[in-house]
Amino acid sequence: MADMNRERHRTRETAFYLFTQQSLPACKPVLTPGWVVEIVDRYDTECVPEAFRIDKISYIQDDSIPKNCSRFMKVHKYMKAPIYIYYQLDNYYQNHRRYVKSRSDKQLLHGQKYHDTSSCQPVELNSGQPIVPCGLIAWSLFNDSFTFIRERAELKVNRKNIAWKSDRDHKFGKNVHPFNFQNGTLIGGGKLNPKIPLSDQEDLIVWMRTSALPSFRKLYGRIEEDLDADDVIVVNLMNNYNTYSFGGKKKLVLSTSSWLGGKNDFLGHACVIIGSSSLILAIVFTLLHLKYRRPHGDTSYLPWNRKSLSG
C-alpha cells in the first residue's frame, strides 16, 4: 500500500514538472500570416496622348478625343481567387463639408415623393425639374471602366454584391429610378440607367459611401479566377474621369484578401504615431514630475491648505 502511494506521488510530481516546463504533449499551432498580394498601376498620366500631356484638362473635357487606353499588369506572385479590383483616387477630398452635405438620403430612399432636397445644392434641379439622385456626390460619380484580358481571353469580372447589403436594402429605394440625371450642360461624372432602380445601381452605392481621407479605394468588382505568377494582364480602360482639374491621381489595384481583410497601412501608421506620441508625453511628464516634485507627506501643497496659508 505504501509503495502504491509513493508511486502515485512520484507520478504527480512528474506530471507537475512536465506541466511547469511546458513539456506535456499538446497541439501547438503555428500561425502563418496569409500574405496579401497586390498590384498597383497608376494610369492617369500614361493614358493621356503625348500631344495633350501639357494640357490634360483640354484632353479630358474634349469628347471628340478617344479616351480608350491599354495597360499591362504583370503578376509577380500567384493570386488566388477572388481577386478584388479597386480604383484608387489620390488628392480627392470627399470629406469636404459642402461635398459631404450635398445629398438627400430620404430622396435616395423615397425618390420624387420626397420634395425637400435643398441640401443637394447646387445640384438640386435642372430645367425646373428635380434631379434623382441629387447632390454633388452623385453628380461626380466615378465613370472609368475596365476590362481584363489574359492570353487573348477576357477575364470575367463579377460586379454584383460590391456594395454593402445594408446600403442596398435600407438606404436606396427599390422603386426609385434615376430621373433627369446628368441632363444639364455641365456633366460631372458617370450616367445612370433610368430603367434600373437605385438599389441595384451598385457603382453609385459604393461611390456614395464617402471617404474620410483624401486617398481612398473603392471596390469595382472581383475576378473569380486564379492568376498565376508571370501572367500578363492586358487592361483595356476608358479614361473618362476628370482628376486633372485638381491635380488628382488615378490608380488601378488588383488585390487578394486574407482573413484580416485586404492590405491597409492605415492601422499600422496610426499605431506607430499614437505609440510615439504616448512615449513622448510620458517622457515629458516624467521630467516635469522630477523637476517639480512635491515632498512626500508635505500637505501644504493641497488647495485648502494654500488658502489657509494665504489668509
Image (tube, helix red, strand yellow):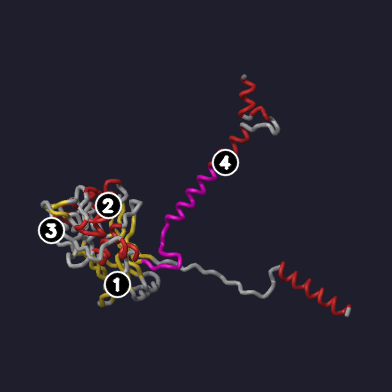
Residue span colored magenta: 255-280
Gap between marks 3 and 1 measured at Cα: 29 Å
What secondary structure is found at the residue carrying circle 4? Answer: helix
Q: What is the three-letter code of the residue carrying label 3?
A: Asp
Q: What is the three-letter code of the residue carrying label 2?
A: Gly
- Pointer 4: residues within 10 angstroms few (<14), some, or many (20+)? few
Residue 266 lies in quadrant: bottom left
Q: Which mark is residue 63?
A: 3
Residue 74 visible in the picture: yes
**First-in-chain label (4 vs 1):** 1
Q: Position of residue 41 (x, y in %)?
A: 31, 62
Q: Tell us which disc is closer to us: 2 or 1.
A: 1
Q: Residue at x 61, y 29 (%)?
A: 303
Q: Is 72 placed left or right of 308 in the picture?
A: left
Residue 310 lies in quadrant: top right
Q: Tell us which disc is closer to us: 4 or 1.
A: 1
> In the rendered image, which quarter contains the C terminus?
top right
Gap between marks 4 and 3 measured at Cα: 60 Å
Q: What is the three-letter code of the residue carrying label 4?
A: Ile
Q: Which residue is drawn at 26% across and 75% down?
A: 154
> Magenta span has 272?
yes
> Magenta span has 27?
no
What residue does disc 4 label?
Answer: 283
Q: Which residue is drawn at 18% across and 65% down?
A: 193
Q: Where is residue 255 in the image (x, y as percent from the top left)?
A: 37, 66
Gap between marks 2 and 1 measured at Cα: 27 Å
What residue does disc 1 label?
Answer: 158
